[in-house]
Image (spheres, helix red, strand yellow):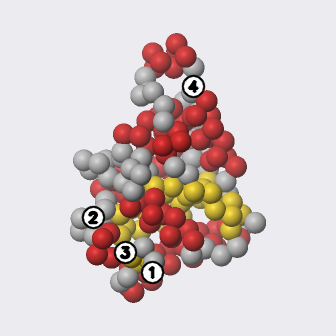
Amino acid sequence: MKKIIVFGASTSRSSINKKFASWAASLLKSVQLEILDLNDFEMPIYSIDRERENGIPKLALDFKNKIKEADAIIISLAEHNGSYTAAFKNITDWVSRIEKGTWADKPILLLSTSPGQRGAQGVLSAAINSFPYQGAKIIGSFSLPSFHQNFNEDKGIIDSNLKTQLKEQLKKLEIELTI
């Protein structure tokens, strides 16, 4: 059974991105899901001085091991001021220092959502453009606009067109996992 790491790139306890990523991943069949909470990987803010003085934190090594053990990754990116959350950026900054290829050439489905109409498309676009340089094999992407209007805790995505679009992206990941 294929193992998929899933997380929302936010430390909010009520993260809509974690909810969205978890729900989307639950639509996949015959896979083992591991839902990560970025709060479990809180580290000092990356700096070369900290790295020289203390080395790489164990939590960065743990996160990298989670990536390496996975067959695929699903991330829903939260957007803060048009970019990654500080916590997500910090984790990836530390992990990038372990070895080349933060994402270990794993297939990744990138998602994003926000309360607004753009659905965090700015950060999603940034990830689509930069992740391949960090060892990601991007299989697909999807942005859910206006989370609170388009998502229900029990039913998931309410709008049938949006739900179909997401399922098309999930299908791409399922196909990749069978190769």
Between 171 and 153, the residue placed more toward the observer is: 153
> Which class describes the residues within 10 Å of circle 3: few (<14), some (14-19), or many (20+)?
some
State the CA–CA distance, disc 3 to disc 2.
Answer: 10 Å
Residue identifier under label 1: 155
Residue identifier under label 4: 56
- Looking at marks 3 and 2 on the same chain, the residue that comes earlier in the sequence is marked by 2
- Looking at marks 2 and 4 on the same chain, the residue that comes earlier in the sequence is marked by 4
Specify the amino acid type for callout 1.
Answer: Lys
Q: Which image quarter: residue 18? A: bottom left
Residue 167 place in picture, x, y as percent: 50, 78
Residue identifier under label 3: 151
Residue identifier under label 2: 115
State the CA–CA distance, disc 1 to disc 2.
Answer: 18 Å
> Which class describes the residues within 10 Å of circle 2: few (<14), some (14-19), or many (20+)?
some
Quadrant holding the C terminus: bottom right
Q: Which image quarter: residue 112? A: bottom left
Residue projecting furthest to the right: 1
Name the residue rendered at 28%, 75% in the picture. 149
Q: Does residue 46 sit above or below 103 in this rendering?
A: above
> Which class describes the residues within 10 Å of circle 1: few (<14), some (14-19), or many (20+)?
few
State the CA–CA distance, disc 2 to disc 4.
Answer: 35 Å
Q: Does residue 161 sit above or below 66 in this rendering?
A: below
Give the mark toward the camera: 4 or 1: 1
Residue projecting furthest to the top: 53
Residue 76 place in picture, x, y as percent: 44, 59
Q: Is residue 27 visible?
A: yes
Name the residue rendered at 36%, 46% in the picture. 84
- Mark 3 lies on a secondary structure that is strand
- Looking at marks 1 and 2 on the same chain, the residue that comes earlier in the sequence is marked by 2
